[in-house]
Image: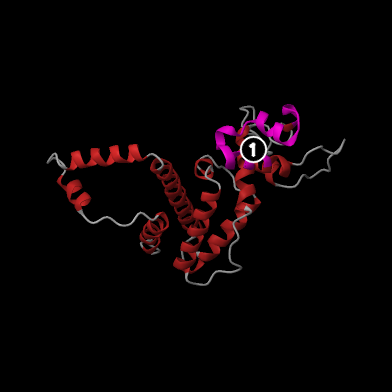
Amino acid sequence: MSSDGKPGADGSGPGPEQLWLPPTEPRRGRRPSFSRETITAAAVGLADAEGLEAVTMRRVAAEVGAGVMSLYSYAPDKDTLLELMVDHVSGELASPASPSGDWRTDLKNIAHLQRAHMLRHPWLPAALSTHRVPGPNTLAFLEHALAVLRPTGLDGAAKLEVFAQLTAFVAGQVAYEITQTAASRSPDRAAAEARYLAAVAADGRHPELAEALAAAGRPVDPEATFTRFLNRLVDGLDTD
């Protein structure tokens, strides 16, 4: 990547300045037939309906009625398109106008917003694992999160770490929730897993597991489970 934010020789796509900042010089030539917003929205629609694997330059071009080559002036590769998609959907994250002052409650509210957002866009947890530089919509949400953490007295780097930790937790939980939901649609698979765990618990070599499995289970409620885990995470944060 070159120092001016332009694509590097390694083919890594445009830099953050080129991708997110307004151009310093007006565009010359013909008015473009498509907008970056239109192309990004088409890619998001494909990912929502069919998963990230469906998002190819060819499929996106077909969705907007363009030639494949014409898309490369908007997004030179799929990684860049993914960056645009993440920031595009981040515009849906409506945060309160100002923090309440109760940072733990506000942080939990942020996590619940993120969970609902990722469930609307099930491809997001995977996309966030490769996400690089935040765009304007993502930055707006990050700004709110940092304001929420101001009463903690943490320094800037620690606040960024807390937000990254929270987002990673939400992404991991949502990915697991999506996987479990898909598995639950196969009763035979669920029954086989239950038989396997029962056999392991009865073999005498896993007494701790046997005791845990014998305890009364909680009702399967993904949102309640998420809230329990979230409370443990946020309530246990050390701000000293």
Quadrant position of residue 32 = top right
Number of residues whose C-alpha sits closer than 10 Å to that of mark 1, classed few (under 14), some (14–19) or many (20 or more): many
Q: Residue furthest right?
A: 29
Image coordinates for residue 194, horizontal then vertical, percent = 27, 42
Quadrant position of residue 66 = top right
Q: Is residue 123 above or below residue 164?
A: above
Q: Is residue 124 above or below residue 235?
A: above
Image coordinates for residue 236, horizontal then vertical, percent = 35, 62
Image coordinates for residue 21, horizontal then vertical, percent = 71, 47
Q: Residue at x 67, y 36 (%)?
A: 14
Q: Is residue 58 magenta?
A: yes
Q: Secondary structure at mark 1?
A: helix
Image coordinates for residue 135, horizontal then vertical, percent = 63, 48
Q: Amino acid at mark 1?
A: Leu
The residue that disc 1 covers is: 81
Q: Residue furthest bottom?
A: 101
Q: Quadrant of the N terminus?
A: top right
Q: Nearer the viewer, residue 60 or 99?
A: 60
Q: Is residue 15 magenta?
A: no
Q: Nearer the viewer, residue 197 or 163?
A: 197
**Stretch of the chain drawn in magenta:** 42-70
User: Seen in the image, is 103 located left or right of residue 54?
Assistant: left
